[in-house]
Structure formats: C-alpha cells, structure tokens
Amino acid sequence: MAQTYEQVQKQIELLQQRAQKLLQREAIGVIERIKEAIAHYGITAAQLGFESSTAPSVTVGSKAKSSASQSPKFADGNGNVWSGRGPRPRWLREALTAGKALEDFVGTATTTAANALLPKAMKKVKPTKRKNAAAKAKSTSRPRYKDDAGREWSGMGPRPKWLKEAIASGKTLEQLAS
C-alpha cells in the first residue's frame, strides 16, 4: 500500500524524536565517562581550551596546576610554542640539533619564567655552537663477542646463527667475549 507524503513526514518526525532521545541518553553516558577522566587526571578547563584569559582558573581535582604554569615559555616566531614541560617538541629538537641554543627561543615577556627552567650552567655560560651534534650523538657499539673465523656480535639484537651454533657445540659466551 502506498503512503502519502503526509504519512511519511509524520514517520520522519517520530523517528527524529526517537533519535533525539537516544542521542541524549548516549550523551549522558559519555559525559559521565568524561567527568570521571577529568577527576582522575586532574584536568583543568584551561587545558581543555575552555578558559578565556579573563576568567578565573577552574580546576578539577587536587592534582591540577594553574594555567599560569602552563603558559608558553619558548617560541620560534613561527607560531610554534612549548611550555617547558613534557618532552621537547620536534621543531625545538631539530633547531637545537641545527646549532641553536635553548635561550634563542625564550620569549622576551617570559624571560624570567623560562630562565627558571634552564640549568644553572646554561644561565652563566655563554652558549657555544654545537658542531655536528647528530654525528656526536650516534654511538657505535664495539663487538663484544668474536669467533675464530672473525665473525662478531655486539650483544645487541638477536643472536646470530654462528653464535647459536657455537653455543650448541659447547662454547660459552665468556669464551667468545673479546
């Protein structure tokens, strides 16, 4: 049997009302889980990006820090910023590897706060350009184990076949150590 336009519109309206009720019910569950996570981790409204610069700091939980301690301390002038907490971002690591000093990224308005994050040695000594820092950072491991045929193993990674065979034949790692 064919339905009229009006009947289809009523069905759509009923389905939309049902969908709205389902959405509200699901949202309540999601909100509860979010509240639990906020309380557990002590997340602030500022960390979530909900706080304006004039609003008072809102904290959830006792572990939360004020938004002032999370303000950017280091910037490169291209919009990249870092608060000085947590791992250094890629843009900063790459710039430091290229020879820049951490002090080069301290903003003029936040110099005092950022200097508190710098080690004492960096505050007193004029920074020197690091030459070929990437080459210095790489370390080569010396071979720790050798056999009579000149095959070597550093002790890192899986044991090579020759070493497994030597151990199976009765030799010990101490005998193969160089």
Image (cartoon, rainbow, N blue to C red):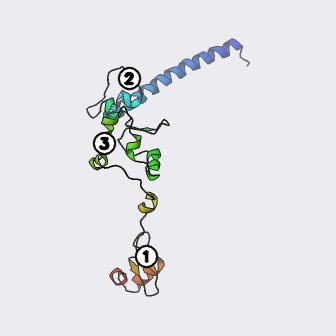
Q: Quarter-wise, where is residue 43 in the image?
A: top left
Query: Taking the image as drawn, is residue 117 in sight?
Result: yes
**70 and 35: which one is in front?**
70
| Between marks 3 and 2 in the image, the one whose residue lies nearer the viewer | 3
**90 and 23: which one is in front?**
90
Classify 69 as above or below 148. Answer: above
| Between marks 3 and 1 in the image, the one whose residue lies nearer the viewer | 3
Structural distance between the alpha carbons of marks 2 and 1: 59 Å
Q: Quarter-wise, where is residue 85 in the image?
A: top left
Amino acid type of the residue that numbered disc 1 sits on in the rendered structure: Trp
**Residue closest to the far right:** 2
**120 and 9: which one is in front?**
120
Secondary structure, mark 1, is strand
Query: Taking the image as drawn, is residue 87 in sight?
Result: no
Q: Position of residue 165 (x, y in %)?
A: 44, 82
Q: Position of residue 109 (x, y in %)?
A: 36, 31
First of labels 3, 1 by sequence position: 3
**138 and 144: which one is in front?**
138
Q: Quadrant of the C terminus?
A: bottom left
Q: Quadrant of the N terminus?
A: top right
Structural distance between the alpha carbons of marks 3 and 2: 23 Å
Question: Mark 3 — residue?
Answer: 117
Classify 161 as above or below 120. Answer: below
Secondary structure, mark 3, is loop
Disc number at residue 53?
A: 2
First of labels 2, 1 by sequence position: 2
Question: Mark 1 — residue?
Answer: 153
Q: Position of residue 29 (x, y in %)?
A: 41, 29
Classify 111 as above or below 13. Answer: below
116 horizontally vs 156: left or right: left
Q: Residue at x 27, y 47 (%)?
A: 120
Q: Residue at x 37, y 28 (%)?
A: 46
